[in-house]
Amino acid sequence: MPVVPLKFRPHQDGLLLFADDAGGYFKSDHAFLRRYACDQLTSGDLAFLHVNGHAYNAVGDLAYSGFEHRFAERLYLPREMDYVILVPTLRCNLACGYCQVSRVNEATPGFDWDDSTVEAVIGFLDSLSARKIKVEFQGGEPLLRLDVIERIRDFCSQRFDACELVICTNLQEVSDPAWDLLGRDDVFVSTSLDGNRMTHQKQRTILPGKTDQFFLHLDFAVSRLGSEKISALPTIDPRNAPSPEEVIETFLNYDIRSIYLRPVNYQGFARKKFDARGSADLWNRYHASFIDALVEHNWSSAVPVEEYYFVHCLRRVLRSGHNGHVDLRNPNIVGHGYVVIDYDGKIYPTDEARMVTRIGQFDMSMGDVFRGISAETIDRLNAEALNNFHPDCVHCPYQAFCGVDLVDDISRYGRIDMPKHMTDFCQRHTSIFDRIFAMIYSDDPKVKKTLALWAGTSHFDPLLAKVHQ
């Protein structure tokens, strides 16, 4: 008898979405489900399943080999460490209410790398086997330690064949030497732009003068560096969010066509000021309205815009190997492909892990740059860092496209064994994948145009929306 490993979920049109363990999918009706559940598949059913790679006859036959290859291609295999996040200071010249890293005031001593820490960090970088590296500076406000950034850049440019630097800055105070650094070919800028001026001022700058200063610097950065070297991320409070149209217009004013919407995180100071622990439903409604607005915009505009994370999830549905985003992988092995080095030299598996430690919830450090890495805690975490055998995931048709985020679960719930359907991570991603498949099977020409743009094709192939009658 053929092996047909399928999961299913109701689709919005009354049909059912079916998917196999390797990410192959199709729609069919309840009659097919009954035949499948009762082991009464017809010859037509079996022909469809075999032709489309959803079934195989025996372990070792060609169909099985193809299925296993597609299944394996969906899994993330950590490579050598070639990405390091550095936090040379926790001091900041802003006091954002939603700060997730629990920054300290600019004048507070004791929250910077000293010379011995800088040398130890350089020693750590020198120990890596990778020939190419990406170094991201976070904070606090990393431009407060321009001297450290310059030292690390000088070392990396000599030590590695290629080095890309990303500086996560609020662009609030930028000196002439800092502009010179930001203008170099190997340096990229990541900043925050919270939707529109009013929201940005309310959440970040507070005073009109500081708001003017930020937008002046953003204008200058775009004109001097080019929009292709700048990513601006909005942090959205779904309870008090700017309209999607306002956000799109603001970003287009700076020729930024990829918008990575982020809800307020349940970390750091935001835990107290924002009730973000169980806000998935509110966020999903706002995010859905944003996708609707993008579809309308892309239909009539010659300048297409995307929502970065939604497009990332779409591409994970359409093809394997799309593992570039560190928060959505399966297995989501942490502490191997990249690490975070904090202001005190401690090493963390993710940026969120250092935030969990910072508020005293759990110590998720994995050593420091002075004594090296101790992987015992991380190995325990990684033992659960996949969704393939989780009882709440094995029946989900989105399993092959989805991942896990144990650190987020620890932050929100203090445990990693919450029923997945009750977690913020699952609720947000279920909503995203529901919407993706609604768009894939849509007959609306507006939706089809946006799908083609986001998939990187001239048109959206109808064969990607298979239906079994």
Image: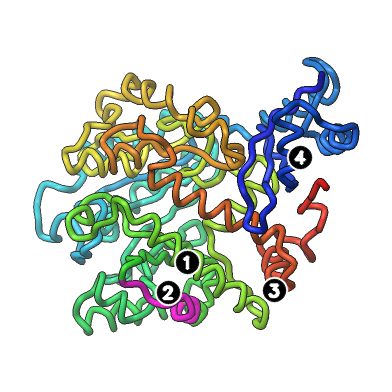
Residue corresponding to mark 4: 32
**Which secondary structure dominates the residues rendered in magenta?**
helix
Residue 315 falls left or right of residue 135: right
Quarter of the image where one finds residue 86: top left
Does residue 257 appear anywhere in the picture?
Answer: yes
Q: Position of residue 286 (x, y in %)?
A: 44, 67
Disc 3 from disc 4: Cα separation:
31 Å
Between residue 428 and residue 107, name the one nearer to us. Answer: 428
Please name which of the two marks, 1 or 4, marks the residue nearer to the observer: 4
Q: Between disc 3 and disc 4, whose residue precedes?
A: 4
Local crowd at mark 2 within 10 Å, few (<14), some, or many (≥20)?
many
Residue corresponding to mark 2: 221
Q: Between disc 2 and disc 4, whose residue precedes?
A: 4
Local crowd at mark 3 within 10 Å, few (<14), some, or many (≥20)?
some
Amino acid type of the residue tagged 3 in the rendering:
Lys
Disc 2 from disc 3: Cα separation:
34 Å
Q: Position of residue 187 (x, y in %)?
A: 46, 58
Please name which of the two marks, 2 or 4, marks the residue nearer to the observer: 4
Please name which of the two marks, 1 or 2, marks the residue nearer to the observer: 1
Quarter of the image where one finds residue 397: top right
